[in-house]
Amino acid sequence: MRRTVAEHQQSVEQLLRQCFSELPASVQNDAGTPVRLDRAVGRVLVADLVAPLDLPPFANSQMDGYAIHTGIEQPISVDNGESTIYGIAPVIAAGAVPAPLAPGMAAPIMTGAPIPAGANAVVPIEMADPNRFGAGDTVRLPAAAAGRFVRAQGSDVQRGSVVITAGTVLNAAHMGLASALGLTELTVRRPLRALLLTTGDEVLTPGDPAAAQGLPAGMIYDANQALLRACLEEARIEVLTATTVRDDPAELLALLAAHTRPPANATNTTGATEATDSTGDADSTGDADAGSPPACDLIISVGGISAGAFEVVKQALGTAADAAVEFVSVSMQPGGPQAAGTFRGIPFLGFPGNPVSAFVSFEMFLRPALTALLGAPVPRQRVVAVLEHAMTSPLGKHQVRRGIYSGPEFESAPSVREVGAESSHLLGALAQANALIQLPAGATELQAGAKVEVWLL
Ligand SMILES: Nc1nc2c(c(=O)[nH]1)N[C@H]1C(S)=C(S)[C@@H](COP(=O)(O)OP(=O)(O)OC[C@H]3O[C@@H](n4cnc5c(N)ncnc54)[C@H](O)[C@@H]3O)O[C@H]1N2
Ligand code: MOO
């Protein structure tokens, strides 16, 4: 079966939508699990977060200076309407509970310290005469508008307001905000759990004793397991197991069976809560059904799906009773051969084995589907850039070329240039790229200066 990129994107999203909604404790309807703030970055907030207090919680000073009350007659002296001499009240440090400010007095106040009752403005120390603390019994200060350098209670966040909306992918600023609001935990969706299978008799994991004397003839070191694990983990998918399978369909089926459960038992396979480990950390290690193989929500295989004599994924899943997997050809390069379907009701995606093809498959199909369904990971930024050189692309294929993007500088437009070439084994070039250049199926000849869509990595 032949598909366009858009058709396969829709098909993958639909597959995941259906499988996830059929899970007993649906990934999409997950009520969420509280996790400590230091574990929450990159996770998805389940429900709107309502501020339990105002920020700032009390009016405080924005500057080191003097707290005064403007606008009332000052008893000591107003010499020319532009400055006033005040008596000096006790110093107010951050963390103090200040006494009310008496009329005619100025209180030395530090940044963040509470504004005393009776004060309504702060004059920075640099504007005072003398311009250092502790230098006299009185101080001359210029006129200040009411409210100047006062951070009013609730001026940042108001108690009862929604500060982070449900579905937000949590970032560092959210952690700071939650902590400032006095929270120790946030309730987030449980992560998806994936089984990652890379394939090939020729593939050796670095460190394998078989390579103790150097890489044996005909063998290569694994790239895909490390690459896809990083893609998945960056998308906050927990990789339950990652393993390389020989080109042996029976071995692959046994592995899949060992990591999944027959559909009849599926009611126990999901909805695990995040257990608290021995360090007291809420983490995603729990499983509802101890003693059973851990439930996975997603199976990703890499390699073994094209036209060779030893296509282990195709041979194993093309006919297996527990599998319903389609092998399709997408009009895209790299990433043309694709597999999608289910194994024991669990969504199964088979990516092609060339490393760049596997990476592009993740970026084009799995990552956008996860974002659409779960709100995370954050989508790739898509921008228009000017090509720095001419490019050609085969008719009828959507090409995803690797590029180096240069953002707009001063008057110049954002631009992109290709790194490497179109072949999908060019991992070195992928490692230099910071962008994917999207050349649609109809774009065969592009001149330097042409505008192209670029996804920033
Ligand atoms: N006659 C045809 N041959 C091929 C076609 C085709 O349509 N007709 N498609 C080509 C395209 S496009 C791709 S992409 C690959 C996809 O093949 P598979 O998914 O079956 O992948 P493999 O054959 O297993 O491997 C392809 C390539 O990648 C290397 N590889 C595999 N695993 C790893 C790994 N873990 N780390 C590093 N490199 C890996 C493998 O050694 C092969 O060189 O098929 C084309 N052929
Ligand atoms: O389409 Mo394959 O995925 O080029 O290299």
Image (cartoon, grey):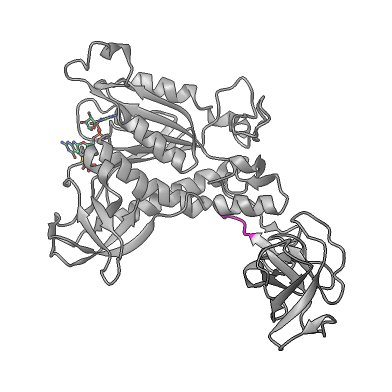
Q: Quadrant of ligand 1?
A: top left
127 lies left or right of 364: right
Q: Give whichever of 113, 436 is nearer the camera.
A: 113
Farthest bottom residue in view: 80
Q: Position of residue 261 (x, y in %)?
A: 53, 27
Q: Position of residue 181 (x, y in %)?
A: 71, 54
Q: Residue at x 32, y 38 (%)?
A: 351
Whether residue 318 is visible:
no
363 versus 268 height, above or below: below
Q: Position of residue 173 (x, y in %)?
A: 57, 54
Q: Main secondary structure of the magenta part?
A: loop
72 versus 413 height, above or below: below
Farthest front residue in view: 136
Whether residue 396 is visible:
yes
Q: Quadrant of residue 312?
A: top left
Q: Give whichever of 361, 156 is nearer the camera.
A: 156
343 lies left or right of 112: left
203 versus 332 height, above or below: above
Q: How many marks?
A: 0
Q: Residue at x 14, y 64 (%)?
A: 448
Q: Position of residue 322 (x, y in %)?
A: 44, 30
Any magenta on residue 79?
no
Q: Residue at x 76, y 59 (%)?
A: 53
4 versus 151 height, above or below: above
353 lies left or right of 255: left
Q: Which residues are magenta?
A: 164-168
